[in-house]
Image (cartoon, rainbow, N blue to C red):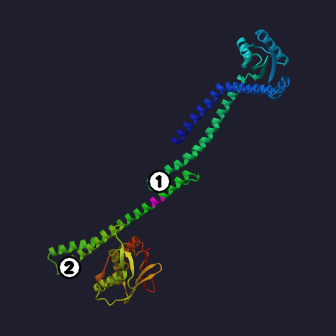
């Protein structure tokens, strides 16, 4: 049992014990008094009804008969005057009750009561008949020269109350155990979701989100649904963060790997110059290696900005930018006989980042030039319903090309056919990562010795 369950059980048990004890004490202490109070009230109302009947002209005999039959009382009548002695009044009243079938063990009308009766005041008295196990409650009502003793029998309820109190205590104890059983089940239903909440928090802390299954149709279920929604969002955020961290780690590893070659070249050719074996090309090689390192570092900084969402998108004319990158490659590949077949729609605008888009386009164009085996490179740019489509294709003769690996870092299907555009196999990997980051669709396939690369840039809504 959890700590909260124990606390709730202790509180509930304490409340039940206190309420049961108070109920028993109040029952023993006040039940008899309340019963007598009600009997006094009842006989007073009966006496009022009797006097009302007399005031309306009913005969004494008829009024007595009617009241006795209707209310289970005995009415005795005695005559008196101011000279009548107290003892005589008592004897006459006892005689009248005897004629009505009521005997007394203890009875006496005191002189002060009789004096008040002669003054017209009613007197209500209780006579306890101990051995007879009942009491007589008598309301003395003076009317003219008569005293009417309206009497009701009050059973001796002390024993009955003691028995009923004991029985009530037993019932209360049994009901307490039943209540504890029901309450323990209820508490379990409350604390079980709380335990699930605790496990949910631990699962979040451990990084293994487990949804909460609660179906109580109340606020606890609403809380569970809210926590599940929060857990899903946190999981998505953690996964996205992990993916970004992995992307940055992969990029850093890629660039570090790529920097090894120019650094080794710079070290090697610098040592050659020191050793006096420079044939006049060493400085150019060192300069080219330095430029390559600068490009790699710029690439790393660009990807870092993308991952930190520091890239500001703007409206870009991709038609113009594509033309500019094609011209760059043509200049770099001026000795080649390759021909670019261009089908480029004019003035197509997209939301993108200029440097990032340059990296994507330039990598795909140079890749086609590097590995193209035919005389043509086909380039298409147009607008369709689902977005802006860019497709570039070239012929190839590589039966060993594995399409499942071409976006993996350092995978090179074959050696470059252009010495000006050699690479290390990071181009398509970088294109794939950047397209994923910007939400572009990037697909590639082969058909009839032709390899196709397609990028679909969604329309901005």
Q: Nearer the viewer, residue 81 or 416?
A: 81
Among numbered discs 1 and 2, the one appearing first in the sequence: 1
Q: Quadrant of the rendered structure where residue 94 is? A: top right
What label does residue 203 carry, if any?
1
Residue at (21, 73) in percent of width and height: 266
Q: Secondary structure at mark 2?
A: helix
- Viewer-nearest residue: 164 or 140: 140
89, above or below 431, in the image? above
Q: Position of residue 336 (x, y in %)?
A: 31, 88
The answer to whether residue 391 shows anywhere in this view is yes
Residue bounds of the magenta highlight? 231-235
Q: Check if residue 274 falls in the magenta segment.
A: no
Mark 1 lies on a secondary structure that is: helix
Q: Quadrant of residue 241?
A: bottom left
Q: Is residue 394 visible?
A: no
Q: Quadrant of residue 247?
A: bottom left
Check disc 2 and report the residue beneath it: 284
x and y percent of residue 440 in the render?
42, 74
């Amino acid at each position: 049992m959890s700590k909260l369950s124990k606390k709730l059980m202790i509180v509930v048990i304490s409340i039940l014990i206190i309420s049961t004890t108070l109920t028993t004490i109040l029952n023993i202490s006040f039940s008899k008094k309340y019963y007598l109070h009600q009997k006094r009230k009842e006989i007073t109302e009966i006496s009022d009804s009797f006097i009302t009947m007399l005031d309306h002209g009913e005969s004494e005999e008829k009024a007595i008969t009617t009241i006795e039959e209707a209310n289970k009382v005995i009415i005795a009548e005695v005559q008196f005057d101011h000279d009548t002695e107290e003892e005589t009044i008592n004897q006459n009243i006892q005689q009248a009750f005897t004629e009505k079938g009521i005997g007394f063990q203890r009875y006496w009308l005191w002189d002060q009561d009789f004096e008040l009766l002669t003054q017209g005041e009613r007197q209500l008295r209780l006579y306890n008949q101990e051995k007879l196990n009942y009491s007589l409650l008598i309301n003395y009502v003076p009317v003219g020269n008569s005293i009417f003793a309206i009497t009701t029998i009050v059973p001796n309820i002390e024993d009955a109350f003691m028995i009923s109190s004991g029985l009530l205590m037993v019932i209360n104890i049994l009901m307490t155990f039943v209540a504890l059983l029901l309450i323990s089940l209820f508490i379990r239903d409350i604390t079980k979701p709380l335990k699930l909440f605790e496990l949910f928090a631990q699962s979040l802390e451990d990084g293994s989100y487990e949804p909460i299954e609660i179906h109580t149709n109340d606020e606890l279920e609403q809380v569970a649904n809210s926590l599940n929604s929060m857990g899903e969002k946190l999981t998505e955020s953690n996964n996205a963060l992990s993916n970004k961290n992995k992307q940055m780690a992969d990029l850093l590893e890629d660039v570090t790997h790529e920097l090894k070659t120019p650094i080794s070249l710079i070290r090697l050719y610098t040592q050659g110059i020191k050793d006096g074996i420079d044939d006049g090309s060493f400085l150019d090689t060192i300069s080219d290696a330095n430029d390559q390192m600068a490009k790699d570092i710029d690439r790393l900084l660009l990807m870092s900005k993308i991952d930190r969402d520091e890239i500001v998108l703007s409206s870009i004319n991709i038609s113009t930018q594509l033309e500019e990158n094609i011209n760059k490659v043509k200049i770099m590949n001026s000795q080649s006989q390759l021909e670019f077949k261009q089908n480029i729609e004019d003035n197509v605008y997209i939301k993108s980042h200029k440097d990032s888009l340059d990296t994507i386009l330039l990598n795909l164009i140079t890749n086609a030039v590097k590995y193209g085996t035919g005389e043509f490179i086909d380039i298409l740019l147009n607008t369709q319903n689902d977005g802006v489509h860019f497709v570039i294709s070239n012929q190839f003769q590589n039966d060993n090309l594995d399409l499942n690996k071409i976006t993996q870092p350092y995978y090179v299907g074959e050696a470059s056919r252009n010495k000006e555009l050699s690479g290390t196999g990071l181009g398509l990997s970088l294109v794939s990562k950047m397209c994923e980051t910007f939400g572009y669709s990037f697909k590639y396939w082969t058909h009839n010795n032709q390899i196709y690369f397609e990028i679909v840039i969604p329309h901005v809504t």
